[in-house]
C-alpha cells in the first residue's frame, strides 16, 4: 500500500512539473506574440502618419490649383 501511495505521489509530482513547464512555455509564447503585436502597431502608425501627410499635401496642392 505504501508503495502504491509513493508511486501515485511521484506520478502526481511529475504531472504538476510538466504542467508548470507548459505554463512557462505558454507565457513565453504570449510575450513573444505581444512584442510582435506592438511592432506591428508601431509600423501601422508610421504608415498612417505618412499617408495622412501625403493626403494633406495633395489637398493643399489641389486647393492651390483651383
Image (cartoon, grey):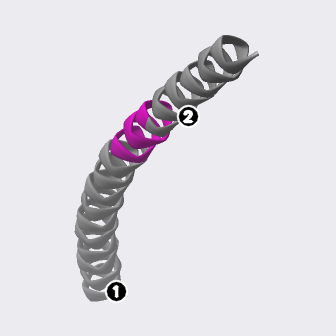
Q: Nearer the viewer, residue 12 or 21?
A: 12
Q: Is residue 45 left or right of residue 2?
A: left
Q: Assign a secondary structure to mark 2.
A: helix
The residue pinned by badge 2 equals 16
Name the disc covering residue 1, or none: none
Labels 1 and 2 touching (C-beta < 8 A): no
The range drawn in magenta is 21-29
Question: For the point 54% across and 22% down, which residue is it?
Answer: 10
Which is more foreground, mark 1 or mark 2?
Answer: 2
> Residue 44: x and y, percent?
34, 58
Q: Quadrant of the C terminus?
A: bottom left
The residue pinned by badge 1 equals 63
Q: Nearer the viewer, residue 16 or 48?
A: 16
Q: Quadrant of residue 7?
A: top right
Q: Nearer the viewer, residue 61 or 11?
A: 11
Question: For the point 34% across and 51% down, which residue is it?
Answer: 31
- The Cα–Cα distance between marks 1 and 2, rounded to whole angstroms, is 69 Å
Question: For the point 23% across and 66% down, which residue is it?
Answer: 50
Q: Is residue 36 left or right of residue 24?
A: left
Magenta segment, prevailing SS (helix, strand or loop): helix
Extreme right residue here?
1
Q: Quadrant of the N terminus?
A: top right
> Residue 41: x and y, percent?
35, 60
Amino acid at each position: 500500500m505504501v508503495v502504491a501511495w509513493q508511486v501515485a505521489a511521484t506520478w502526481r509530482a511529475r504531472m504538476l512539473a510538466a504542467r508548470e513547464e507548459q505554463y512557462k512555455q505558454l507565457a513565453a509564447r504570449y510575450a513573444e506574440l505581444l512584442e510582435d503585436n506592438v511592432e506591428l502597431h508601431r509600423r501601422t502608425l508610421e504608415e498612417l502618419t505618412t499617408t495622412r501627410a501625403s493626403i494633406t499635401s495633395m489637398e493643399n496642392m489641389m486647393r492651390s490649383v483651383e
